Amino acid sequence: MEPRTEPFSEPQRLEKLRALSALGLDPFGRRFTNITHHAAEIVERCDALAGQVVRIAGRVRAVRLHGGSCFLDLHDESGRIQVYVRKDAVGEDAFRLLDLVDLGDFLGVDGTVFRTRRGEPSVDVTSFVPLTKALRPPPEKYHGLQDTELRYRYRYLDLMANPDVRRTFRQRAAIIRAFRHVLDERGFLEVETPVLHHQATGAAARPFGTHHNALDLDLNLRIALELHLKRLLVGGFERVYEIGRVFRNEGISTRHNPEYTLMECYQAYGDREDMMDLTEALVRESARAALGQARFTYQGEEFDAGRPWRRITFAQAIRDHGGPDIDRLSGEEDWRGAARGAGIDPTQPIAKLMDDLFEHYAQPHLRQPTFLLDHPAVMSPLARAADDPRYALRFEGFIAGMEIGNAYSEQNNPLAQREAFEQQARERQRGDAEAHALDEDFLFALEHGMPPTGGLGIGVDRLCMLLLDAPSLREVILFPLQRPRA
């Protein structure tokens, strides 16, 4: 069912709206307070509540008239409850109001709980009041809203029609609460940092641009949370985190959305080892919060977030799955030759080429929870170098062949950080539009001293997608970006 777009496509609903107004009733309702129960509670505890007076409210999803009585299905956030309206209980004038009720309208109901002769938990109505007249019908009762594009575009109808979708977003909320619980318990302080940046820094990504009229400034929407959070460690905080939206001007796919939720946290006096421990805890407790256990299934494959994660180096992962021994690649031309041998564009920026080699040979094989360690340093300009300076003290977390987290032993040497930024600037001049910008203000902060630090970022949407067995990222984003309708 595609929602109609012409104004007020149900003229009989407008007539009923006018009729309600003529009776002195507000078709768009007044406050209806002191609601005592939700539908699911009445259904679950029907026998215990039998004979008890309840007050409920919800949307009408079915109407069944039987002479001097009427059954209605009332839906609230928790589910469905049947209500039973009798003319001799509510009075003839009130009963006639049912002629003005349509599917999709909201009603407030007072009554007593009982079971029908067929055993259906119900509410015997003593009074009711129209709360909102719906001028368009809800999605068809039995088939709901099935078209994927329409479900994303009209998410409110998707939520109205599909209880499983409402459950998904309640579980998503539980995952985010679990993040906060784990971090708060470990002494992290939740903070908020700017969305508008002078420079798009902190990640390899293209930004969205905007303009501030009053200041006449061109600005970017943030692509990461990193550099402002690190400034807070310079200022004296020791453990900080933020859960917020970031914006990357990239393609849309089942695994990518240009606007998404990112959690980043930074721990003074820590390193990537601490971040691996924290990642395991965050994923484990998120699974338990959403699913009741650490085990979960994604697209038919079983995973266990309760076990220690496997650890493998970037070089070993490529080598173990048929790729070259990158430890023996002595320079950029060797890397480009390896790319050529794999059918990968050898002319692209070197960091992208390295990432493509990994994706080609190894990434699909990282199924069970895995930490990928020691990336080439050129791919990791914000991380400290390992003992072998060709590599960085970095890891990425992978589940089901998808990257869900990225972490560093953070670079706190301002001289080394400047050198890395300058190398990125050279890459940008050579055509790498996603290379990091040189951020002088961040370097100025770093020159005042930042303690040794471990930092971690986890894509919340992608983790939700995995834990909730969603085939696409857009299943776990309430309002994913869509092209406007013609």
Image (cartoon, grey):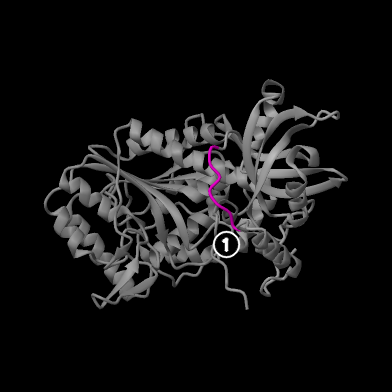
Task: From the viewer's side, name the closer residue of 148 and 332.
Answer: 148
In the picture shown, does residue 132 fall above or below 190? below
Please state the horizontal and vertical placement of residue 248, each as a whole percent of the image. Answer: 43, 64
Left/right placement of residue 135 relative to residue 393 reads right
Q: State whether residue 5 appears in this view.
A: yes
Q: State whether residue 320 appears in this view.
A: no
Which amino acid, by three-letter code, is at mark 1? Ser
Residue furthest out toward the top: 48
Left/right placement of residue 170 relative to residue 384 reads right
Q: Which residues are magenta?
A: 28-34
Please state the horizontal and vertical placement of residue 100, each as a whole percent of the image. Answer: 74, 57
Residue 30 on the magenta segment = yes
Q: Quadrant of the C terminus?
A: bottom right
Task: From the viewer's side, name the closer residue of 30 and 43.
Answer: 30
- The residue carrying pointer 1 sits among few (fewer than 14), some (14 to 19) or many (20 or more) residues within 10 Å by Cα, namely few
- SS state under label 1: loop
Please state the horizontal and vertical placement of residue 265, each as a whole percent of the image. Answer: 33, 44
Residue sitting at x 68%, y 21%: 48
Please state the horizontal and vertical placement of residue 167, each as a whole percent of the image. Answer: 61, 42
Q: Quadrant of residue 102?
A: bottom right
Left/right placement of residue 375 relative to residue 253 reads left
Q: Quadrant of the N terminus?
A: bottom right
Residue 451 on the magenta segment = no
Q: Which residue is identified by label 1?
A: 253
Give the dominant element type of the magenta stretch: helix, strand or loop. Answer: loop
